[in-house]
Amino acid sequence: MSERLSIALDGPEAVRGALERTIHGGGVAVFPADGLYGLACDPLRADAIARIHEIKGRDDGKPSAVMYLSPLLMRELVPSMGERTREAVGTLLPGPVTLVIANPERRYPLACREDAERLGVRLIGGPLAGANVAMLQTSANVSGEPAPARFADVPGPIVDAVDLAIDGGELSGSPSTVIDITAIEGGGGWAILREGALPRAEVEAALG
């Protein structure tokens, strides 16, 4: 039986603490991101990642983003970033975007999958902001099914299979906008890989 907490009833501080304990302990959590509910675990734990694939029903082979809830923790990536990458990250994050950045140090290879020199990263705000965890995150749905925007719509078998399930109320329902900035240092610009919560016009205004 999973531990179940509500941000509204239990308070953000208690929920953040439970999330930190779960992820650092090698567990798996259902959590509210900014737009949709997700599954999360330690991105360095192969066993936890395998559990997520089992919970979702299959391993689709796709890379997963590493999500940060604290900008201080995300600073671990800064030494490997070029100037233009740092500017883009500083402009767009935190926000409803996933940035695919160059990863010359090959951090979090289990999240990167077959291309260890490209890493998807997220930084979000909201009630979980400040939690001292980096998390591999993917949507909290059975593979091939819609990603849920309400805790009540997270499939029961998924909630039962995780170590911690966090009810964050109803979310926007929009996925993040995925932006590839791996070529930005060499003047190659950027590309939107998936349109989502942040409109293209706002991306263009931010990145030029």
Image (spheres, rainbow, N blue to C red):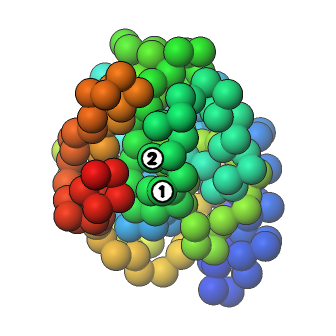
- The residue at 37%/13% (across/down) is 114
Establish if 69 lies above or below 119. below
The reply, left or right, for residue 170 in relation to residue 147 is right
Q: Nearer the viewer, residue 8 or 121?
A: 121
Establish if 61 lies above or below 139. above
**Image mark for residue 91:** 1
- The residue at 22%/39% (across/down) is 191
> Label 2, on which residue?
88
Q: In terms of image quadrants, where is residue 100?
A: top left
What is the secondary structure assignment of the residue under circle 2?
helix
Residue 183 position in % (x across, y down): 33, 26
Residue 140 position in % (x across, y down): 40, 53
Q: Nearer the viewer, residue 58 or 111?
A: 111
Q: Is residue 200 visible from the viewing direction of this image?
A: yes
Establish if 36 lies above or below 80. below
Q: Are marks 1 and 2 in contact (CB under 8 Å)?
A: yes
Residue 80 position in % (x across, y down): 61, 24
- The residue at 34%/76% (across/down) is 172
Establish if 28 lies above or below 2. above
| Kind of residue at disc 2 | Ala
The reply, left or right, for residue 52 in relation to residue 3 is left
| Kind of residue at disc 1 | Thr
Quadrant placement of the N terminus = bottom right
Residue 13 position in % (x across, y down): 79, 73
Q: Is residue 27 visible from the viewing direction of this image?
A: no
